[in-house]
Image: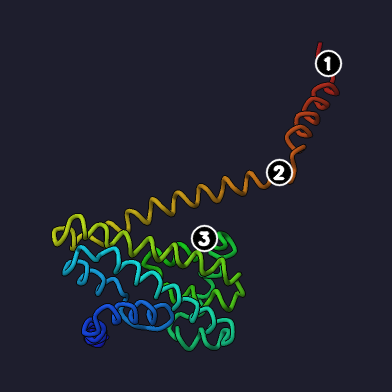
Amino acid sequence: MHDIFIQMTEYFKSMGIWGLALNSFVESFFLVPPPDFLLIVMDLALPAKALFYALVCTIASAFGGAIGYGIGYWGGRPAFNWFFRKGGKEKFEAVETLYNKYGTLAVFFSAFTPIPYKVFTIASGILSMNFWKFMVASFFGRGARFFIVSIVLMLFGEAIKQYIELVIIAVTAVIILFFVVLYKKRKSFIKAEKFPNNAELEKNVSFDEKVNEPVQF
């Protein structure tokens, strides 16, 4: 499998910018090497075009995500099980749990982290997630990942290459933490808006309980 992935990467590399776009597009719904490898090679070869390469990856990957969504929407669980024969049930349940907890943010996290993006694109269609929300989350999530890689390589060059995954993981952790905190704050705010009198009611109940308490002599 490793040799096949190397051959695929070399094939995409031979096509230049179109190979980078094709790699990013197909990887969003099928088992091919992540475009990060080719992106790194091209960034180091031409640092001046690093941001352009990141943009190409982002757009192609987001459109590929739309194909993955369609596969899930029309192919359902049988299509998912065919693509992910090993551990398909566990993968789907994990995705469903994240969706139930974080909604659209789950797609953002999957697009930005090493979690297989294709798992989420196909599952999004099966779960009938809002398509446009899915596309926005995919675009910004994948874009964040690719632009971080390109910017870091553009600034530090070959010296940072061996640490690029650590940089991605570190930035991922910070961004995920930020959005989780934001999500929880938003839920609290919405709850407070729906039930604005809860706090006052609790105060009144507490006051009544104190008034009705028997006087101790």
- Residue type, numbered disc 3: Leu
Of label 1 and label 2, which has the lower sequence position? 2
Q: In the visual, does 163 lie left or right of 139?
A: left
Q: Residues within 10 Å of mark 2 (few under 14, many from 20)?
A: few
At x 66%, y 47%, the residue is 190
**Which residue was labeled with disc 2?**
193
Dot 3: element: helix
Judging by the rendered image, the residue that carries numbered circle 3 is 105
* For residue 121, side relative to residue 3 (left or right): right
User: Would you identify the image quadrant in which residue 99 lies?
Assistant: bottom right
Lateral position of residue 5 relative to residue 85, left or right:
left
> Above or below — where is 86 with respect to 172?
below
Residue 95 falls left or right of residue 55: right
Q: Secondary structure at mark 1?
A: loop
Mark 3 crowdedness (10 Å alpha carbons): few <14, some 14-19, many ≥20: many
The residue pinned by badge 1 equals 215
Q: Residue furthest left?
A: 159
Other residues around mark 1 within 10 Å, as few (<14) / some (14–19) / many (≥20): few
